[in-house]
Amino acid sequence: MREHHRAKGCTQRRLAIAGALCALAAVVLLAQMIRLQVVEHHHYATLSQENRVKVEPIPPTRGLIYDRNGTLLAENQPSYQLVITPERLEGVARTLNRIDGIVELTEAQRRRFRQRLETARHFEEVPLRTHLTQREVAEVAVNRHRFPSLEVQARLVRHYPQGEIAAHALGHVGRINEQDLRRIDAAAYRGTDYIGKSGIELAYEEVLHGEPGFKRVETNALGRVIRTMERQAPRPGDDLILTLDSGLQRVAERALGEQAGALVALQPGSGEILAMVSHPDYNPELFIEGMTTERFAKLAEQGQQPLFNRAVQGVYPPASTIKPFIGLGALEHGVVTPRATVECDGEYHLEGRDRPYRCWRRWGHGEVDYRRAIAESCNVYFYDTAFRMGIDRISGFLEPFGFGAETGLELLGERSGVLPSRAWKRRAIGEGWYHGETVLTGIGLGYFSATPLQLAKATATLANRGRVVQPQLVRTIRDSIDGSESRAAATVPQQRIELDDPRHWEVTVDAMRRAVEDPSGTAHRIAEGLDYTIAAKTGTAQITGLAEHRDDQPEERPRRLRDHALFIGFAPADEPEIAVAVVVEHGGSGGAKAAPIARSVFDAWLRDDRSYLQALEARRRRAEGGREASSG
C-alpha cells in the first residue's frame, strides 16, 4: 500500500514536470511564431519574395559624340561574343578543341573561360570569345547544330570611327574596375561594363552614361527566369556636339606628321577649339576590352609617351613667342616706345656678371626699334626691355593673359605651367629673385613654362585686342529623348584687358605681321602665296646645359638635344577667325619647323584647302572598289 502511494506521487510529479515543459515549449513556439509572423513579418516576406521575384538591371545606351559639322566621332557598334551554357556542355576540353577549329581561341581566352566556369551557375551563359568577325559569326551559325551549348550574343560596345583622330581630346572608355567603383554610384552602373577613362569620355561621363532601367522577373528555386513581370526602359545617355572640326583636325595631325609635339587651334571670337593635336597618339579602341600586358608593352615601345596629352599637360618654355606680350607690357608701362631703338651687337651685359647674354644672331641686329625687334626676334632688345621693366610688372601684366593658371578647359589633368615672380620663387624654391632671371624671362626662358593651350588662349586674347575668351571643347548637349540642345556650360563673363593707349594693340599686331611679311622676319618662309594676312611670332626654346653642342649646325646634334620649335599666330590679322599655337619637341627652329605646320592649318580653315584629304578619300574608295571586284 505504501509502495502504491509512493508510485502514484512520483507519477504525478513527473506528469507535472512534463506538463510544465510542454507549456514552456508551447510558449516558446508561440513567441517564435509571433516574432516571425508579426514582429519580423516584412523582413521574411521580402526574403521569401526574393526567392521568387528578382530585379535585373538594364544598362543604358551610351551617348554619341559628334564634331561641329555632325561627323560621328564616337558611337556604339554591335559586337558579337561567343557564349556557352554550362548545363548543355559536353566536356570542357573536348568542346573547346572542337570550337577551336571554327573560331580561333588563345590560351589566355581558354584559361579565362575555365575560371569563369567555376563560379557560374549551370544555366548562366559564360563568355568564351568577344569581338567575333562577321566571318566567324557565319561559321558558328553554319555549325550551330554541332554545339548545343553554343550561342552568339550581340551587344553594343564603344567604337571610334575616325580611329586615332582627336584621340587625346575624345579620350576612351574601359572596363569598370575597383578604383572606378570607389568614386561612382554602384547602383547607377549595375549592368554597365564600361566607363569613361580619359578625355571627354571621362569629363562628361554623367552626361554620356544615361540612367539604367530594370526588369522584374519571376524565377524558380534554381534561379532560372520563368517570366518577366515588369520592365522599365533605361534612359539613353545624351549626345555631345564638340567644337572640333574633324577635317581641320586631320589636316593638323597630318601637318605635324611623326614629330612629337602639340597644336591647338581655336576661334578667337568664341574660344571654341577647332583642332587639338597631341603626337604621338594612340587608338582608343585598344582600351575598350581592357589593356593586356602584351598590348601595353607594344604601345610603350612606341616611346615618347603616346598616352600623354601634350596640348594640355605638356609644359614648355614659351621662348620668343612671349616677346609680343612682354613688348605690349613695356609699351603700356612706358618702358619703351614704338620708335625708340636699342643697339644689338649680339650680346647683352648685365652689371656684375662676366658672361654675356647672347642674341640668337651672333653678329647682332644693329639698331632695332619695337616693330623690328619683334619681327626679327632680337633677344638683346628684350633682355634690356625686361630688365628695365622688372619682374613684378612683367608677371603682373602677363597674368590676365592666362599664363601660370589653368584655362578651365573641360579635360581633366590640365597643368598650369609657371609664370615666374618673386612670390612664386619664394614659395616654390625658397630663394630670392635675381636680375639675371628677369633677363631670361624677357625671352620666355628660365623658370617660365606654358602649355600649348595657354599659348593659344593668350594668342586669341591678342587677336581680340584684349578680350579674353574661355577655351571650350564641347559646344552643346543634345537631349536623347526630345532632341533639344543646350549649351554645355554656363556662359563665362568675358573679361577684357584694358590698355591706357589702345593703339598699342595695333602696334604689336603690326610687328607680328612684319614677322611674316618682311624678308628678314623669322616667319617669312610661310609668306609665299599668301592671299590673307597672318600676325605671328616664332620661338626656339633652348635646351639647357648644352654648351658643348652650341654650333652652327644644330641639325647634327642628337635629336633629344635639339631645341623645341614654337609658333603662335592668328589670321586674318585685322579680323581674326583662327588662332594657332604649335610646339614641335626637339624640332629646332620655330620658323623652319613649327611655322609651316601652322600655315597648313591656316590654309585649311581660311581657304578650305584640304585637297590632299580628298586625294586620300579617293584612294580609299579605289581600294575598296578593288576589294569588292576581287571578292566578286
Image (spheres, rainbow, N blue to C red):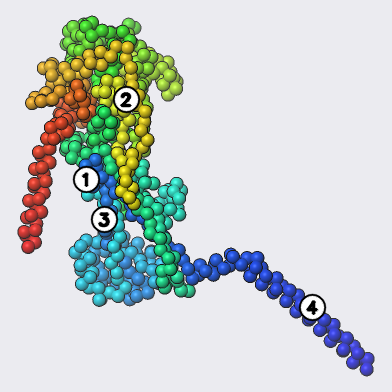
Tell me, yes or no, whether the two marked residues, 3 and 2, touch with CB atoms within 8 Å. Answer: no
Q: CA distance from mark 2 to mark 1?
A: 29 Å
Circle 3 is placed at which residue position?
A: 77
Quadrant position of residue 309: top left
Circle 4 is placed at which residue position?
A: 20
Q: CA distance from mark 1 to mark 4?
A: 86 Å
Quadrant position of residue 537: top left
Residue at 24% x, 11% y: name it.
381
Q: CA distance from mark 3 to mark 2?
A: 40 Å
Q: Give above or below for 166 relative to 36.
A: above
Three-letter code, disc 3: Gln
The disc, 1 or 4, on the residue closer to the chain's N-terminal end is: 4
Quadrant position of residue 48: bottom right
The disc, 2 or 4, on the residue closer to the chain's N-terminal end is: 4
Residue 624: % across, % down: 10, 54
178 vs 142, left or right, is right
Q: Give above or below for 508 relative to 471.
A: above
Picture disc at residue 71: 1
Instruction: Provide the secondary structure element on which disc 3 rests.
Output: strand
Residue at 20% x, 24% y: name it.
575
Tell me, yes or no, whether the two marked residues, 2 and 1, touch with CB atoms within 8 Å. Answer: no
Quarter of the picture holding the N terminus:
bottom right
Disc 1 crowd rating (10 Å Cα; few below 14, some 14-19, many 20+) is: some
The disc, 2 or 1, on the residue closer to the chain's N-terminal end is: 1
Picture disc at residue 468: 2
Residue 215 visible in the displayed image: yes
Instruction: Provide the secondary structure element on which disc 4 rests.
Output: helix
Residue 356: % across, % down: 27, 11
In front of the other: 456 or 312: 456
